[in-house]
Image (cartoon, rainbow, N blue to C red):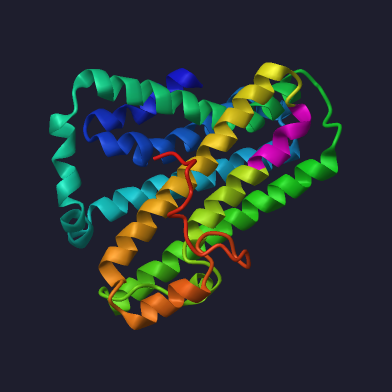
Amino acid sequence: MLLLCLLVSAIGFWRHVYFISIGYGYSIAAMGVVALVLTGSQASLVSWMECLLLIAYGARLGTYLVIRETRPAYRASQKADADRPARMGLGLKSVIWVTVSVLYVCMFMPALARTLADQQGIPDPLGGLSILGIATMALGLVIEVVADAQKNAAKKKDPRRFCDTGLYRFCRYPNYFGEMLVWTGNLIAGASLLDNWLAWLLAALGYISIILIMLGAGRRLEAKQAARYGEMPEFRDYVARTPVLLPFLPLYTLRNIRLYLG
């Protein structure tokens, strides 16, 4: 799986941001495909559902990011970032490449543990918990897809205005919330088959890392939106009454967090 992620995420040598964007999405999807192929007819229904959800998640994200890269407006907004790869040495790129590839395997570990258990004929001791995890993953994927679609529609209607409709009425970054649900559900779905301390360590490392990455991404986006829309009274009102990341949780800013990645 690590070699697979290294192969897929090598696209980041073209532009380093692709290590953690396009390479990320397609690495997750590729691991899901390979896990199912290697498990074959021994894969349980829950394993099929977990891997298919991860394939759908990764393929959708990777394709969404590829399409976004083709849009002139997005390329213009990222012009400053376009110069960074030229200033980044091969050594640093290589470190990022290996690090993120290891991270993607760790994130996939609960699904991998499940498919390995299927190959060995080990039954799931907590089937109900696993189904709960699958449902959480599905909910997270739906939220992420709908949130991205609603934001795109809002931007087409008025590119200069922030999005505060649909799921964005409940939290300011519902797409990030959806991603957090996907990975929380993935951990729950495979938790009963993480049967040794190393598997738990890797799965925990992957899960904690993606949560911290989502916090960092939310923190950066909050600062970006404040700079872009901060002069609008309606934006300030929106920020004051809408939770930043988790619906119904009265947390309205991530600027004060000290523990995050990215």
Residue 20 percent across, percent down from the top left: 37, 37
Q: Is residue 75 left or right of residue 199?
A: left
Asked if the magenta segment contains residue 79, the reply would be: no
Q: Is residue 119 left or right of residue 224?
A: right
Instruction: In this rendered view, identify the residue nearer to me: 52 or 96.
Output: 96
Residue 114 percent across, percent down from the top left: 71, 29
Give the answer, above or below, for where 218 lies relative to 195.
Answer: below
SS majority, magenta = helix
How many labels were placed on the picture? 0
* Residue at the limit of the structure toward the right, as seen here: 125
* Residue at the limit of the structure toward the bottom, as seen here: 234
Residue 86 percent across, percent down from the top left: 13, 32
Q: Residue at x 64, y 44 (%)?
A: 184
Give the answer, above or below, for where 146 lies relative to 257.
Answer: below
Asked if the magenta segment contains residue 190, the reply would be: yes
Residue 36 percent across, percent down from the top left: 61, 30
The image quadrant that residue 22 belongs to is top left
Give the answer, above or below, for where 141 lies relative to 96.
Answer: below
Instruction: In this rendered view, identify the residue nearer to me: 173 or 257.
Output: 257
Q: Residue at x 51, y 65 (%)?
A: 252
Q: Residue at x 82, y 31 (%)?
A: 124
Where does the magenta region start and end? 186-193
Q: Residue at x 35, y 73 (%)?
A: 162
**Quadrant (top left, top right, bottom left, bottom right) of the C terminus:** top left
Instruction: In this rendered view, identify the residue nearer to me: 255 or 68.
Output: 255
